Amino acid sequence: MERWKKVAIVGSDGEAFLSSVHGNQSCVNCHGGKREAASMEEAHEGLIRNPSENPEKYCNGCHADIVSKHLTSIHRTQQGYFTFFSLRYDGTPHGVIPPDFTSEFNQECGSCHTTCGQCHISVPVTARGGLVKAHNFYKTPDMTKNCTACHGSRIGDEYLGKNEGLKADVHWIPNFKTCDFCHTGREMHGDGREYDYKLQVRDMPACEDCHNRGQNNSYHDMHWGKLSCSVCHSQPYRNCNSCHVGGEGITGEPYFKFKIGKNSNPQDRSYQWVTLRHIPIARDTYSAWGFSTLPFYDIMPTWKYTMPHNVQKITPQTEPDSTAVIACAGNCHNNEEIFLRPSDLDPGEVNANGAVVVKDDEWPVGP
Amino acid sequence: MYKVKIFSFHLQRAFVLIIAGAIVLFLSCTDKSEKSDGSTAFTEKLTCEGCHTDQEVLQKLAPGIDEPPPSSGGG
């Protein structure tokens, strides 16, 4: 994108902004800097690029309810990172996080948290910013310029069908079923509660919010409630390896796999069988920050419960055979390839995944 | 008498040209001027809106392309 366009308040969008409630205020009220100046540098002295980093000061006057709830939202706090670091570092979800970790995290990873403006005014900073609609404040975030600008490599590519050989999500209807079709503002803003990680969030959507078991569907009758919907209705998805801080990022090659495993967290979701995605955590992920290893690395699976955003009615698991009957045994029950088996595990990850891997006596062999 | 009229005619034309040139020069200088270090200074103070609503000024002040990184992280 041309740099000038990122800060331009021109055209019909510009006119709309300038006559809007927000546009009627002086720029310096929110952005600081100098209102009148003889050079760009002088004008930008003391500039506040992203005022909504401090929503209590700049947004609270009109949006107090949302601001107060958003302060504890995982979208803002990134609490999931701290919870899982704590679990792997000292064995408890609420252990003392070393100050060095917090400081390094804020510098290298903290810019990924959301602010009001990065969803409702501009492209997120991590995607290089830029006004979306000439500084207009829009209620619903733009799917590609806001949501998938951050959630692009897995969710965005899956949902939009950008992965070679795989279909887009069945819910993807351009300009209609965008992210907000399932993910509400209430879920995004937070409800004021403090959650340890995202699966605890009460307002997360579920397939069952819209879909019921149906009638005369023997497959649903047999599996409903025991299998997560994605076990049957997802396609292969991206898995990642080896993320290392210190600027390295993800050093392992991503790969596409579809793996069913046991649900190690039934308190979050009650299914017995779920889809699992390999996450890019390694024992030395944080070594560049001075944490050479994670003493409790084995406490959490590295194959994690996932909800792929590439849902289809007909998938390799539900594909009918030549007699128009779903070949239960061939597609799933005797198909070792789609289960997370001990042979799939890296030797260093065997202990970490004991709760999710499917052992010989647990594998549903048979018709 | 004829020579006086001719001289007067040329004088008027020169005067008009000088005035027109001065107006053009004035208009081209009021917006901005290049400083020796490559930054742009305005010959008169401008406001936030004065720059951010003016496409020509912005193109001068913020040239180039700034692409986002390839989608490699995030969820």
Image: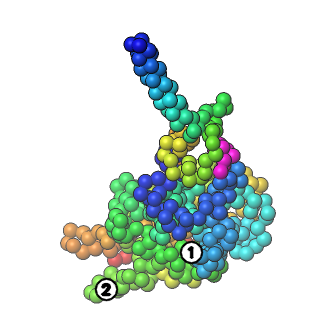
**Which subunit holds the residue at mark 2?**
A
Three-letter amino acid code of the residue under disc 1: His
Mark carried by residue A321? none
Residue A85 is inside the magenta segment: no
Looking at the rendering, the stretch of residues picked out in magenta corresponds to A36-43
The residue labelled by disc 2 is A214
Q: Residue B64: x and y, percent?
A: 52, 39
Q: Residue at x 70, y 74 (%)?
A: A93
Three-letter amino acid code of the residue under disc 2: Gly
Q: Residue at x 49, y 64 (%)?
A: A19
Q: How many other residues sit within 10 Å of disc 1, few (<14), some (14-19) or many (≥20)?
A: many
Q: Is residue A164 left or right of residue B64?
A: left
Q: In this view, does A186 lie above or below A100?
A: below
* Label 1 secondary element: helix
Quarter occupied by residue A256:
bottom left
Q: In this view, does A321 lie above or below A133?
A: below
C-alpha distance separating marks 1 and 2: 33 Å
Q: Is residue A164 left or right of residue A319?
A: right
The residue lying toward the viewer, choosing from B63 and A219, is B63
**Which subunit holds the residue at mark 1?**
A
Q: Residue A185: x and y, percent?
A: 50, 75
Q: In this view, does A31 lie to the left or right of B13?
A: right
The residue labelled by disc 1 is A189
Residues at circles 1 and 2 in contact by the CB criterion of under 8 Å: no
